[in-house]
Amino acid sequence: MIPLVGKVGKFLAEKTAGKTVEKTAELIVVDYMGRSDVANRQSLKRNWQELSCKASDIEEKVHREEMSGKKKRKREVDSWLKNVKNLSPEIDALETRGSSWRLPLKEDPVGKLQLQVKELVDQSRHFDGLVLDNYNNIGEPCLPTKLFGVKFEAAKQRIWPCLVTDDISSIGIYGMGGVGKTTLAKHIDYHLSEKPSYQVLWVTVSQDFSVTSLQDKIANVLGITLSNRDEEDARARILCGAFSKMERLVVLILDDVWEEFCLDRVGIPLHPNKCRLILTTRSREVCDRIKCQRKFDLQTLDTDEAWDLFKYRLGSETLLQGDLENIAKSIVEECGGLPLGIITVAGSMRGVSNICEWRNALEQLKTCSIGYHEMERDVFPILEWSFNRLDKYERNCFLYCCLYLGRADVKTGLKTKSI
């Protein structure tokens, strides 16, 4: 076509032998070539957009698979994604580079990029799967803290059928602080993670709650990024879209919820076959206001169960005999059947064999008294006692860490021992 236009222009010029017509023919050729270059650029832009969208979808699918820790991306897929990413700067710089119709296709910048884009699109059509089993990470999942007590085991057995039925999308686990709600939820997480049809997402909400902060935390576990410039509604729509693209049944566990919130406002689209919710909270009212379809109340341990948990956490290196055993049982009694308190005290007394120190510990526990609320009355005195057993430097370190709310990561060069 291009040689033909050139010949037409030359023919017109020769036939008329006039400069005006010759100039007109030259403009026809230039105008055609200009329009051809624009068309090529537009075609490249369309193809590049198609390739970019495909790369984004593949990256998202691979990321979701890798989140389980049991899959890893194929090398050819990883190389393909890198090649697409490396091509992006050349596409962006095309406006300043220009093109030339006189060059062969492979030497023309636009034509060269067209070939590269087409080659990458063709490659993506022949992937035989995107991920492989990650044998380095495959193994038995880390078993959470052992459950103690008939009540805890019974609660787990009652919750499990709700996770496999088709009409339950929300479950609430409530009880006072330190009773073991998070531990029970971790056991559920552990057993669900063993099933390939489930994708479990864990988010710790905590007391410093806001809709945007919860949206950010959920986005983080989903592997997406939300803009702080967007309104809550826009962010919620993005989260809903991300949940809808999940290929497996999602179980979202929200741990330590302190106040009610609207699921739609956050962007959590509950559906029995797509997205289910498990939340832990200290308040039955929170479960009611969030409209949990099933609610489970966790109670404290009875005397024998509390004693078994104490001995288990204390370890075999400390022998409990005679008066020492009686004192230890009195200490456990002061914990009121709360697993958190029992575990805290047992950890502090591990390795202590001096009976006088055990007596002092019991007396100190009896004298610790702060607050009037249920949580403060039963749990805080045990934590206060544990804090008082730290040395000066450990206390300062602990108080420093308390400045970081919401279980944030504390970046510091200090070295501390386990407390």
Image (tube, rainbow, N blue to C red):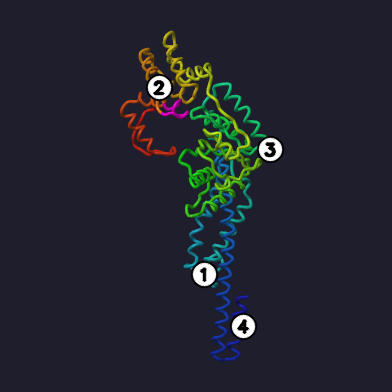
Which of the marked residues, 2 or 4, is nearer the chain's N terminus? 4
- Residue range highlighted in magenta: 371-380
Give the answer, above or below, for where 85 lies relative to 276.
below
Which of the marked residues, 2 or 3, is nearer the chain's N terminus? 3
Q: On the image, numbered disc 1 is attached to which residue?
A: 99
The amino acid pointed to by label 1 is: Ser
Between the residue at mark 1 and the residue at mark 3, the CA separation in whole angstroms equals 59 Å
Give the x, y percent position of residue 236: 55, 50
Between the residue at mark 2 and the residue at mark 1, the CA separation in whole angstroms equals 75 Å
The amino acid pointed to by label 4 is: Val
Which of the marked residues, 4 or 1, is nearer the chain's N terminus? 4
Give the answer, above or below, for where 359 lies relative to 288.
above
- Tell me, for residue 166, which label it has, or none: 3
Which of the marked residues, 2 or 1, is nearer the chain's N terminus? 1
* Figure quadrant of the N terminus: bottom right
The residue furthest left is: 392
Give the x, y percent position of residue 387: 37, 26
Q: On the image, numbered disc 4 is attached to which residue?
A: 8
- What is the quadrant of residue 133 in the picture? top right
The amino acid pointed to by label 2 is: Ser
Q: Residue at x 66, y 31 (%)?
A: 161
Between the residue at mark 4 and the residue at mark 3, the CA separation in whole angstroms equals 74 Å
The secondary element bearing badge 3 is classed as: loop
Which residue occupies the foreground of this view, 332 or 64?
Answer: 332
- What is the quadrant of residue 50 in the picture? bottom right
Q: Residue at x 53, y 34 (%)?
A: 283
Q: On the image, numbered disc 2 is attached to which residue?
A: 348
* Figure quadrant of the C terminus: top left
Between the residue at mark 4 and the residue at mark 1, the CA separation in whole angstroms equals 24 Å
